[in-house]
Amino acid sequence: MTTPPPPPRRRLPLAPLAAIAAVVAVAGTGFLYAAGRLGDAPPTARTLIGAIEAAAGPHPGYRRAHSRGVCVGGWFQGTADGAALSSARVFAQGRVPVLGRLSIGGGDPHGAEAGARVRSLALQLRSDDGADWRLAMNSFPFFAVPSAEAFLEQTRAQIPDPATGKPDPARMAAVLAKYPSARAFRDWAASAPWPDSWANTTYNGIHTFVFVAPDGHRQPLRWALRPRAPLVAMDAAARAAATPDYLAAEFARRLAAGPVAWDLVATLPAPGDALEDPSTPWPAQRPTRTLGTLWLDTMAPQAEGACRDVNFDPTVLPPGIEPSDDPILAARSVVYAQSFNHREREITRGQAPDATDQAGPR
């Protein structure tokens, strides 16, 4: 199979208490640098990436979070509603080429796909005016904590105790007691169905963005990709019995039958809805607009695919779409850039044969 041609490389300014610790780690890794302190060291992007690597083990050449994935390609078709809300060319062009990546949460590039609570979809849409739109979306409907400082507390609670090799449950319990959003995230992780495919998973943008219409009207909104494939839940027994590459193999079978589609749906806020806190979801009854449809029709291993060397920084936006003042969104950009530079340097130095398909069969 083939994927769309790779874009030029750019380095851009990214249950039980033990179970919730692992899930929340997936939600947070790759997202934040923050103000505050982590021990005696400032919590820079380098500090947090180091903590992620310490938890997941060294995997040169791979993304530090969402390490296991595949490259995908296809196209996006905008709607009249999208073109009315935003002057971005992607909504008026017609068919816009798409390069993307489907992945699972966690820092192990060889982790079992079906066992990952979090699934992710990252996209690059490049319109014929040369503008890029990059989206980084996840299956969880909101972020686990409300601030960078809270993320630091959460990160500390996830550090394994040398005596047990596991996080201290009391420290995670303290985070859960302090932050209602962490408890809500735990409840989502424990109760939400596990889709049996990347194709029938909903992917949420979580952050607020601002669409600027051709007449200058500014509309804050949040977006999500809603699958056209019907949800089929996967129970614990099926997940345990699945092969490590279950999601990739299942998605390949779907593509053999034809393209897979999601509708890009925007939710519009009401006065008083949180615009800068991704841990606070908006009520389900808010009005929506369908902005377009994403179609995926190709897949390739990430070691040799065009997505491997793309930084899917969600603050890379075309004219007509702007970021909100969400500080976590801005922080993602910094951490993504640091992670991107690390893995590109490892690849360039020949330190990542596994990530570049040069190690031979395992």
Image (cartoon, helix red, strand yellow):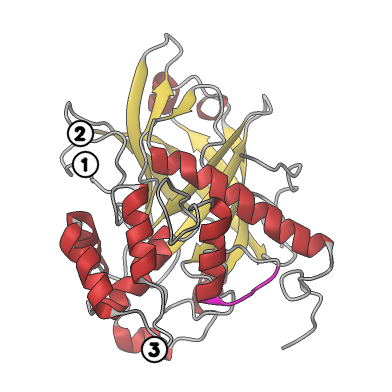
Which amino acid type corresponds to the residue marked 3 in the rendered image?
Answer: Ala
Query: Which of these two is toward me, 34 or 7?
Result: 34
Image quadrant where residue 71 sits: bottom right
Vertically, is 314 above or below 170?
above
Query: Which one is earlier in the sequence, the residue at label 2 or at label 3?
Result: 3
Q: Is residue 190 visible?
A: no
Quadrant that contains the N terminus: bottom right
Q: Is residue 349 left or right of residue 86?
A: right
Looking at the rendered structure, which numbered label has been put on residue 235?
Answer: none
Mark 2 = which residue?
273
The region drawn magenta spans 56-60
Vertically, is 273 above or below 54?
above
Image quadrant where residue 223 sits: top left
Residue 165 locus on image (x, y percent): 42, 87
Which amino acid type corresponds to the residue marked 2 in the rendered image?
Answer: Asp
State the SS at label 1.
loop
Residue 32 locus on image (x, y percent): 46, 51
Q: CA distance from mark 3 to mark 1?
A: 34 Å
State the SS at label 3.
helix
Which amino acid type corresponds to the residue marked 1 in the rendered image?
Answer: Trp
Residue 58 magenta-drawn?
yes
Residue 131 locus on image (x, y percent): 63, 29
Q: Are marks 1 and 2 in contact (CB under 8 Å)?
A: yes
State the SS at label 2.
loop
Mark 3 = which residue?
240
Q: CA distance from mark 2 to mark 3?
A: 40 Å
Q: CA distance from mark 1 to mark 2?
A: 6 Å
Disc 2 residue crowd, few under 14, some 14–19, many 20+, Cα 10 Å: few
Vertically, is 354 above or below 163?
above
Q: Is residue 184 left or right of residue 335?
A: left
Mark 1 = which residue?
282
Query: Which of these two is toward me, 310 or 4?
Result: 310
